[in-house]
């Protein structure tokens, strides 16, 4: 059973990201402040939910929470500052877009950097413990999946519609055959034996 909040602060925000382990596409983060009476039996860590359930939850979350924001950070930035820093930056940028401004932040995982002196806690597996992080995980995942569906139209040979940029066998075979695109993260190991990739 997900808990409503972690702290005693009125505007506690939960944040999470999606797409850290992908070879292509952005890392996407969301931040959510729940409204006081928010309840949803279906809500869980996005990884535990089917795509259908996530798509069902997305408009409910957007309509019923007090505030939410989503940020995509592109591969160019990921390559410049590394994926951990990009994940944190995407979460921070989402938090800064929230209105009202949060008085406390709970973060899925174990790494974060302070922003605007707002107190925070990192929570391992927070997306399966707290509603606001679970809601953020659903938004991050659904927004990122939608983004990958759109860029799939531009480069259908990588089948991002299905693999969403993760390192599946099919995705790697397409990289081997066609080479990387502007959406690929060049600092990632795109192929198991990198020597075969002409960059």
Image: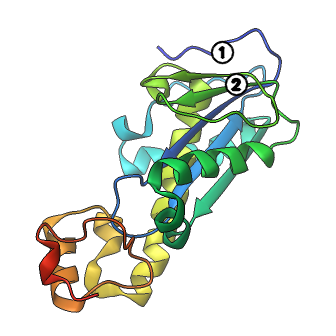
Q: Residue at x 44, y 23 (%)?
A: 124
Q: Give the mark toward the camera: 1 or 2.
A: 1
Tell how many labels.
2
Q: Give the residue furthest to the right.
A: 100
Q: How far from the left and from the top, in percent, is residue 174? A: 20, 82
Which quadrant would the C terminus be assigned to in this image? bottom left
Q: Residue at x 44, y 70 (%)?
A: 148
Badge 1 local density, few (<14 within 10 Å), some, or many (20+)? some
Tell which of 186 and 59 is nearer to you: 186
Badge 2 local density, few (<14 within 10 Å), some, or many (20+)? few
What residue did someone put label 2 on?
A: 38
Q: Give the residue furthest to the top.
A: 8
As drawn, 190 above or below 83: below
Asked whether residue 56 is in view, the answer is: no
Secondary element under disc 2, as helix, strand or loop, is: loop
Q: How far from the left and from the top, in percent, is residue 122? A: 55, 24
Q: Residue at x 47, y 47 (%)?
A: 84
Q: How far from the left and from the top, in percent, is residue 5? A: 66, 15
Image quadrant of residue 159?
bottom left
Sequence order check: which comes first, mark 1 or mark 2? 1
41 on left or right of 172: right
Asked whether residue 22 is in view, the answer is: yes
What residue did someone put label 1 on?
A: 5
165 on left or right of 111: left
Image quadrant of residue 67?
top right
């Amino acid at each position: 059973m997900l808990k409503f909040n972690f702290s005693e602060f009125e505007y506690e925000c939960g944040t999470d990201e999606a797409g850290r382990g992908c070879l292509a596409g952005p890392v996407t983060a969301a931040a959510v402040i729940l409204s006081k009476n928010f309840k949803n039996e279906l809500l869980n860590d996005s990884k535990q939910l089917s795509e259908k359930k996530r798509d069902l939850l997305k408009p409910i979350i957007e309509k019923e929470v007090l505030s939410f924001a989503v940020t995509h950070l592109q591969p160019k930035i990921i390559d410049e500052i590394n994926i951990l820093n990009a994940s944190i930056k995407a979460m921070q940028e989402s938090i800064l877009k929230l209105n009202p401004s949060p008085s406390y932040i709970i973060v899925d995982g174990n790494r974060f950097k302070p922003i605007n002196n707002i107190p925070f806690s990192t929570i391992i597996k927070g997306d399966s413990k707290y509603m606001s992080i679970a809601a953020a995980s659903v938004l991050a995942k659904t927004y990122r999946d939608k983004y990958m569906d759109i860029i799939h139209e531009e480069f259908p040979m990588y089948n991002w519609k299905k693999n969403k940029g993760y390192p599946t066998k099919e995705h790697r075979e397409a990289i081997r055959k066609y080479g990387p695109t502007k959406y690929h993260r060049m600092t990632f190991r795109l192929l198991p034996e990198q020597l075969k990739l002409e960059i």
